[in-house]
Image (spheres, rainbow, N blue to C red):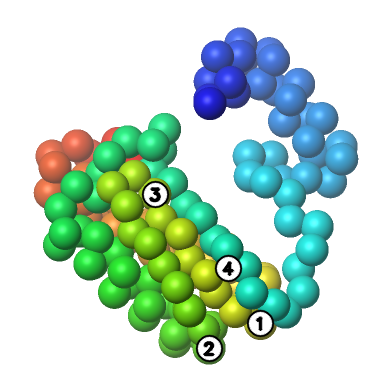
């Protein structure tokens, strides 16, 4: 599943350079279609660690997701929040906003949960 982590540092550099040469982002999937429509958006915890193990964390994440998406005019029609990843069915009217939305959601939750778990610096 995580072949990238099995590569040597040199192999990783070469892979990232190949992606950049093709116009792809260095570490995320390319998104060649960015039209106004419904998208199934998925995000996972680092290496699929089970971080969302309590219902309160899953609810906190869901509340933050709704706050960030709804405040920017996006429509969420379905969702599933699991222990190590989540899925959202969202009507996306401005694809360019997605990055900053996910940064807000993931940045605040990872910081807080790492403090709670006494795991400062852990990748979530």
Q: CA distance from mark 1 to mark 3?
A: 24 Å
The Cα–Cα distance between marks 1 and 4, rounded to whole angstroms, is: 10 Å
Distance between the alpha carbons at the discs numbered 2 and 1: 8 Å
Question: Can you say which quadrant of the picture contains the C terminus?
Answer: top left
Crowding near the residue tagged with mark 2, few <14, some 14–19, many ≥20 C-alpha atoms within 10 Å? few
For the question of whether residue 10 can be seen, the reply is: yes
Could you tell me if the residues under marks 3 and 4 are in contact, i.e. CB atoms within 8 Å? no
- Say which mark, if any, is on residue 93: 1
Label 3 crowd bin: few (<14), some (14–19), many (20+), radius 10 Å: some
Residue 82 horizontal/vertical position (percent): 32, 52
Q: Earlier in the sequence, mark 1 or mark 4?
A: 1
Q: Secondary structure at mark 1?
A: loop
The answer to the question of whether label 2 and label 4 lie on touching residues, with beta carbons closer than 8 A, is no
Q: Which residue is mark 3?
A: 85
Question: In this rendering, would 113 be left or right of 124?
Answer: left
Q: Disc number at residue 6? A: none
Q: Mark 2 or mark 1, which has the lower sequence index?
A: 2
Residue at image coords 79%, 63%: 33
- Check if mark 1's residue and mark 3's residue have beta carbons within 8 Å: no
The residue nearer to you, when weighing 105 against 51, is 51
Residue drawn where x is 16% and y is 59% of the image:
55
Instruction: Assess whether mark 1 and mark 2 are in contact (beta carbons under 8 angstroms).
Output: yes
Q: CA distance from mark 3 to mark 2?
A: 24 Å
Looking at the image, is mark 2 or mark 4 earlier in the sequence?
2
Name the secondary structure under disc 3: strand
Alpha-carbon span between mark 3 and mark 4: 17 Å
Q: Circle 4 sits on which residue?
A: 98
Residue at (57, 63) in percent of width and height: 40
Q: Earlier in the sequence, mark 3 or mark 2?
A: 2
Query: Residue 99, how many percent across, how many down?
Result: 57, 63
Whether residue 94 can be seen here = no
């Amino acid at each position: 599943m995580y072949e990238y982590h099995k590569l040597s540092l040199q192999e990783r550099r070469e892979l990232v350079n190949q992606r950049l040469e093709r116009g792809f982002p260095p570490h995320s999937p390319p998104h060649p279609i960015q039209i106004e429509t419904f998208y199934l958006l998925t995000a996972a915890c680092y290496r699929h660690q089970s971080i969302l193990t309590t219902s309160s964390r899953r609810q906190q994440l869901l509340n933050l997701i709704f706050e960030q998406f709804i405040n920017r005019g996006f429509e969420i029609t379905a969702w599933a929040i699991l222990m190590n990843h989540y899925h959202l069915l969202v009507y996306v009217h401005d694809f360019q906003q997605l990055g900053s939305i996910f940064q807000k959601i993931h940045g605040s939750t990872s910081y807080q949960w790492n403090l709670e778990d006494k795991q400062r610096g852990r990748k979530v």
